[in-house]
Image: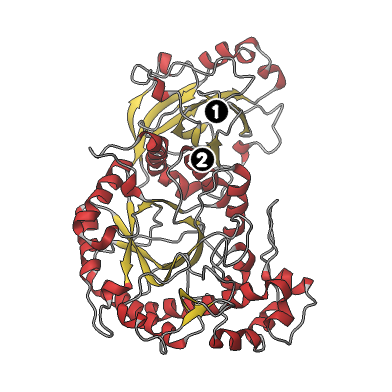
Amino acid sequence: MNNLFYDRDGTPFFSIGGQVHNSSTYSEETMQRAWKAAEALGLNTVAAPVFWNLLEPEEGVYDYSQTDMLLRQAKANGMRLILLWFGSWKNGASQYIPVWMRTQKERFRWVQTIQHFETRVLSPHCEENRQADARAFSKLLGYLKSHDTEGIVAGVQIENEPGQIGTPRDYSDIGERAYLSQVPEEVTGWLQGKNPRKKTGITGTATVHEIWLEHGSRTKGNWEEVFGFHAAEICTAYTFAVYINSISAAGKQEYAIPTYVNVWLGEMYNRVAGIDYPSGGATSRVLDLWKRFTPDIDALCPDIYYNDYLMYGNICEKYAGPDNPLYIPESGATAMNAVNTFRGIVEFGLCGIHCFGIDSLIGPEGNLKPGVLEYANMVRIVKAAVPLIQKYQGTGRLYAVTQYEGSAFDYIDFGDFIGRVVCTNPLGDAYAADTRAYMDAGHTEEEHYNVRGKGLIVYEGNGSFYLAGEGFRLNLIRKDTIEGMTTGVRTSNFQNLRHQEYLEVAEGHFEADMRFVTDRLRTGDECDHGLWVHSDIGIVHALLELHKNEHDPIEGNVLRDVQELPGEGVI
């Protein structure tokens, strides 16, 4: 598992949290609603901004009251905290810089458009801008090191969706000089080496290295001569990456806490840099360059609000890798995002996810709004399954259940079992005559069935299954011999489910030492319709009799290469 955040003892921490609205951290009163929402959602982390204009109201004078308030409230609510440094840039503009910077325009320079209109974006080419941000960020991290003695803060985001909106590059005098100068040797030298990141998926975007190759692989020249059409964005991206990396490096000299940068995606609208998204941010087009020139930043993280299958997978594939933990710092609290989260965990190594604007997700009485309920169920499922995720992610034994439109079934070959996932809500599947089945007396309402099938399945081998999720059940057919598989008690779904060779089916949870604790045993009707799950029951563990057929061994049979059957409920 490729992780970004850890506990003090080195244990990986799966952050499942929410980000508050931009201005919610101005006071304790405005934050109360956010903490209530976080509790209602069942989150373990809150991401909250620290504003440069409040931290350094006068140059060289620092006020940590906003940071103190967040540390105090997080501790009182029993949650971890991720601080968002709203420094030079927030969403492609410079809205949170101190007044004393705004009034010294000759010293602190701003980006200009081609018409020399001055934007509200600090120029990444200005050294005074960079030094001021680095000093303030270092003060913040130094304060955290001495005052967050319990490790409440899991990590720090540097800037927020940085880049410049309104123009693809800076046309001021300092921006022009940078653009017309020779591309630095550290860039051309890197381009001549090995660059493993390549465009991926049906919405693949050429990387900086591929753009350079297509433009003639020049090793001398200014940015436009070397990169052609995309030169403005690439020059700007290099400048932003170097600027922000230096801020992280300065901060880590005070406190070596995980840092990351979040990304306003380039897969927006017409995909024009500076117009449809901030030019210079770590978008997929310039991600390879950002990774090369940000060695002091732990991850570059996409803000994913897309719900559709293809776009979600395409973005995750681009950002996930051995060199970049996949953490999604902003997303929507939607039912489809809840489904996609399980896909992200299994297919792309997702190690944390946050939804945005949690203070808007509850009503006046503090109850979750109806459209958020499936997302809240996902949070509950993931929290229960974290021990399974941390042990089995990337091993090939962790499976995702993700129900998309028009599908109520899925098929999984576990090696010595065939698994048929049956979702309780058909969602327009023409072959789904009746997907509902009895669960138990506590799960008979419409809300228990009218949800998308989503969750995780672990097959340890040796007949040991773990499940967490909702809206589906798992039917198993033992895969021993073709004669056995075609007997009447297996070919009939009704008969097969009543002849499962369960040693035990238990609902339970994991303790801190990874020990599985049984809360309730299932028998009778609760087992006769397959292994069903719901978000309020924690983990289901099913243990089946172990069969070995020496006359007809199954190629690749899991039984031959797995660990011994675990002891009493221990994984």
Say if residue 254 shows up in the picture: no
Circle 2: residue type: Glu
Q: Is residue 76 above or below residue 113?
A: above
Q: Residue at x 63, y 75 (%)?
A: 232
* Circle nearer the N terminus (1, 2): 1
- Residue 271 appears at what percent x and percent y? 63, 60
Side of 225 where 463 appears, left or right: left
- Residue 366 appears at what percent x and percent y? 24, 40
Q: Quadrant of residue 20?
A: bottom left
Spatial CA distance of label 1 from label 2 is 12 Å
Q: Is residue 14 above or below residue 488?
A: below
Residue nearer the viewer, 556 or 181: 181
Q: Which mark is residue 546?
A: 1
Local crowd size for mark 2, using a 10 Å CA cut-off: few (<14), some (14–19), many (≥20): few
- Residue 426 appears at what percent x and percent y? 55, 23
Say if residue 196 shows up in the picture: yes
Circle 1: residue type: Leu
Q: Quadrant of residue 491?
A: top right
- Judged from this view, the residue extending furthest toward the right is 216
Q: Residue at x 70, y 77 (%)?
A: 191
Local crowd size for mark 1, using a 10 Å CA cut-off: few (<14), some (14–19), many (≥20): some
Q: Is residue 121 above or below residue 332?
A: below
User: Which element carries disc 2, helix, strand or loop?
Assistant: loop
Side of 167 where 376 appears, left or right: left
Residue nearer the viewer, 16 or 48: 48
- The residue wearing badge 2 is 564
